[in-house]
Image (spheres, rainbow, N blue to C red):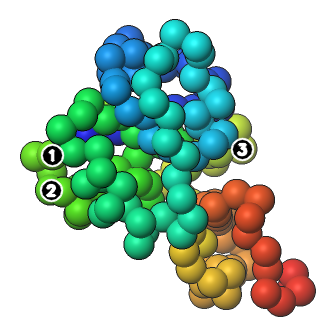
Amino acid sequence: MITVAGIGADGWDGLPDAARRALESAEVVMGGPRHLDLLPASVRAERVAWPSPLLPALPGLIERHAGREVCVLASGDPMFYGIGSTLVRLVGAAGVRVLPHVSSLSFACARLGWPVEQVETVSLVGRPPETLNAAALPGRRIVVLGPGPALRPRSPPC
């Protein structure tokens, strides 16, 4: 069983008890470096930063730690364009327990005062920036999900 814990910008302090317990009892914690850096010293698990590119390496990484208590850290809701969905596809729903946090979409909409149901969501994770073109229409509210600072536009911004 792989436990996937969503973590927010508030880090360890914002985690519910179930996620804290999962992380504290894990033998291995996987995630991005920025997520792993949010963990306190009390989490004594081996910390494994995601390789790049992640998807081709993921099956071997999961296999390498089979039989160990593994917890994965993810941004917000791991089932919203996140690693939770990828792990479920890889090992099946019965092999993954997800402890979600507030999604990045809900967080952004709360900050902007936009109703979630009135927002178009576009993910640029693993997709070219041109993916955004189809959604960019006058008057439309768009939340764009991206991989972080590593994303570099291939063409000048409009």
User: Mark 3 = which residue?
Assistant: 112
- Residue farthest toward the left in the current orientation of the protein: 94
| Most foreground residue, 145 or 11 | 11
Residue 95: which numbered mark, if any?
1
Neighbours of disc 2 within 10 Å: few (<14), some (14-19), many (20+): few
Q: Are marks 1 and 2 in contact (CB under 8 Å)?
A: yes
Q: Nearer the viewer, mark 2 or mark 3?
A: 2
Measured Cα–Cα span from mark 1 to mark 3: 36 Å
Q: Quick one: quadrant of the N terminus?
A: top left
Is residue 6 rendered to the left or right of residue 11? left
* Residue type (three-letter) at the residue carrying disc 2: Gly
Q: Quadrant of residue 37?
A: top right
Is residue 49 rendered to the left or right of residue 146? left
User: Mark 2 = which residue?
Assistant: 92
Q: Quick one: quadrant of the C terminus?
A: bottom right
In the rendered structure, which disc, 2 or 3, sits on the residue that comes first in sequence?
2
In the image, residue 89 lies at what x, y percent? 23, 63
